[in-house]
Amino acid sequence: MLTVEQVNKLVGNLKDPILDVPLKDTGGIVNITIKEEIEHASVKIAIAKLGGKPQLDLQMAVVQTLKENGANTVGIRFEELNPETVAKFTGEDPNAEPQTIEGLLSKDNPVEFIAVASGKGGVGKSTVAVNLAVALAREGKKVGLIDADIYGFSVPDMMGIDNKPGIEGKSVKPVERHGVKVMSMAFFVEENAPVIWRGPMLGKMLTNFFTDVKWGELDYLLLDLPPGTGDVALDVHTMLPSSKEIIVTTPHPTAAFVAARAGAMAKHTEHSILGVIENMSWFESKETGNKEYVFGKDGGKKLADELNSELLGQLPLAQPTWDPKDFAPSIYQPTDKLGEIYQEMAQKIITKTMK
């Protein structure tokens, strides 16, 4: 099994991904713990900037290096180097006033932010976010979509995206599909790898999606938020200069009750609620045309009334028509019944957000 000295030497030779300087020279190895009985090595590392692909690359390099040299399992925690240390290698003044954030997060940016939220998982929030984005693009709008559901990212799979973002200079170029520019944590994580980051690190990753991505001109930027009112959802609410919110629920009373918390957070952070979308409203038999209200009735309308907002639309249970030549498993075609409903909701959104 590896010793503390060996781990210190192996990891110390790896470079800080931002400073391009070995960790042994930056003092980046904060702590090392060895558990010989289970052949486990745990390392705490300080780097110049948390979040994004550089940190992920270093994390993978540390795991690979230590496993190749005898560790059975590896634990890694990250923190930021102090500004004075960073300044030593960059030549920047650590006491300088922070620069004003430009681009998407600038208060002068005309882009309309729309956060799609829900009180709980399993109500179809991501499906709604994806199809609203596509519907707005079909209306001729320039649309971006951030898959901000960091722990449960699913947008690329839903949209049938196989390729990765491009690089242009120091910026990342989003993937475009169905007329929508897309960014997701899924692009930077190995397939089926779990995300075990804590809130502050995830917040920095989201900031990178706003500041380091070359979005170009946008009319709308939709954000598929994690369900509930946790760290990531709160970070998004606080970092945006202004945002409108769509709350997704099912007709079930419990779903509508917990969705009200997401609406309350929007109001608490002085963001307006654009409306409520009720998903899984009913099942309609193709043979008889009868509607079965599988999850109850009127939960969306009651939630909209409680939030002093409106019910933008009701979506029955139905599967999209799949195009085998252009497969996107969760995208409804314009001729699908739900595709028509999404288009109607997109038109409502455009009307309600016209300035």
Image (cartoon, rainbow, N blue to C red):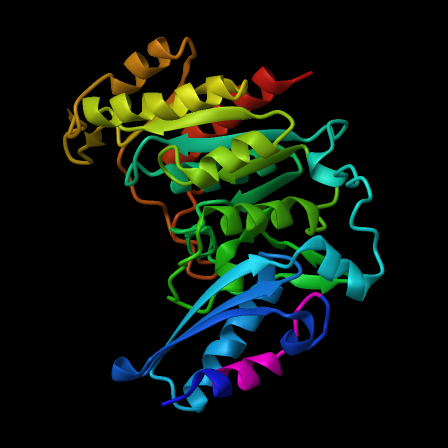
Q: Residue at x 44, y 58 (%)?
A: 327
Give the answer, above or below, for where 77 lies relative to 113: below
Q: Nearer the viewer, residue 314 or 17?
A: 17
In the image, residue 245 lies in the stretch drawn in magenta: no
Q: Is residue 164 visible?
A: no
- Left or right: residue 249 versus residue 166 is left
Point 53% across, 36% down: residue: 236
**Placement of 43 over or under 96, stated as above or below:** below
**Residue 121 is drawn in which quadrant?**
top left
Residue 88, position as x, y percentages in the image: 79, 63
> Would residue 96 be seen by someone viewing this image from the given angle?
yes
Image quarter of residue 49: bottom right
Q: Quadrant of the N terminus?
A: bottom left
Q: Find residue 102 and report its horizontal and vertical position in percent.
A: 77, 39
Q: Is residue 78 left or right of residue 257?
A: right
Residue displayed at 53% across by 78% down: 61
Give above or below for 17 relative to 321. Answer: below
| Magenta highlight range | 7-18
Front residue of 204 and 34: 34
Q: Is residue 15 magenta?
A: yes
**Which quarter shows the C terminus?**
top right
**Residue ID at (77%, 27%):** 108
